[in-house]
Amino acid sequence: MTDNYTISTDKSLLDLGVIHQFLSQESYWAKNIPLELVQKSIETSLCFGVYDNGQQVGYARIVTDYTTMAYLSDVFIVKEHRGRGLSKQLVQFIIDHPELQGLRRWILVTQDAHTLYEQFGFTNPDDPKLYMQRKLISSY
């Protein structure tokens, strides 16, 4: 990482307050998500924190079986630290993670970050008709 930034998968370093605040107040995908759900998602995912001198400024998590697929979710860099290439460094760090090598498929859902993910080989599905969803909650 550049400057004083580091990325870690150590869950003990995660700042639940920063993560919950961003997801529940600033994200479009998890607006008003309860703290308990954020806690459970952290417990059951491979998490990546981005830190500036120990202060959390970014986050992402992977839902995976470590064998065939990975779902990239909740990727963010707080506003004050954007424009420094941190999101690119975070995604590259995740893709290079040793436990995520050899997967058949990576998936994600984004409304506005297509150009970021395209740099790492993400594309629209070859055949969207193959993909289905069961959406039960539109908001929290």
Image (cartoon, rainbow, N blue to C red):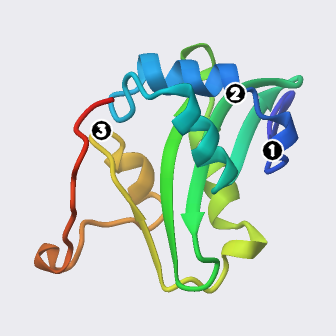
Task: Determine the CA span between mark 1 and mark 3.
Answer: 27 Å
Give the x, y percent position of residue 24.
Answer: 45, 22
In terms of sequence position, does the residue under pointer 1 or pointer 2 come before the other? 1
**Secondary element type, mark 1:** helix
The residues bearing labels 3 and 2 have C-alpha atoms spaced at a distance of: 25 Å
Residue identified by numbered label 3:
112
Q: Residue at x 21, y 64 (%)?
A: 133
Query: CB under 8 Å between callouts 1 and 3?
Result: no
**Image: 25 above or below 92:** above
Counting residues from the N terminus, which is met first, the one under dot 1 or under dot 3?
A: 1
What residue is pinned by disc 2? 16
**Residue bearing the label numbered 1:** 11
Question: Label 3 is placed on what type of residue?
Answer: Asp
**Residue 96 rendering spot, x and y as whole percentages:** 70, 67
- State the residue lying farthest toward the left: 129
**Which residue is depicted at the point 19% across and 70% down?**
132
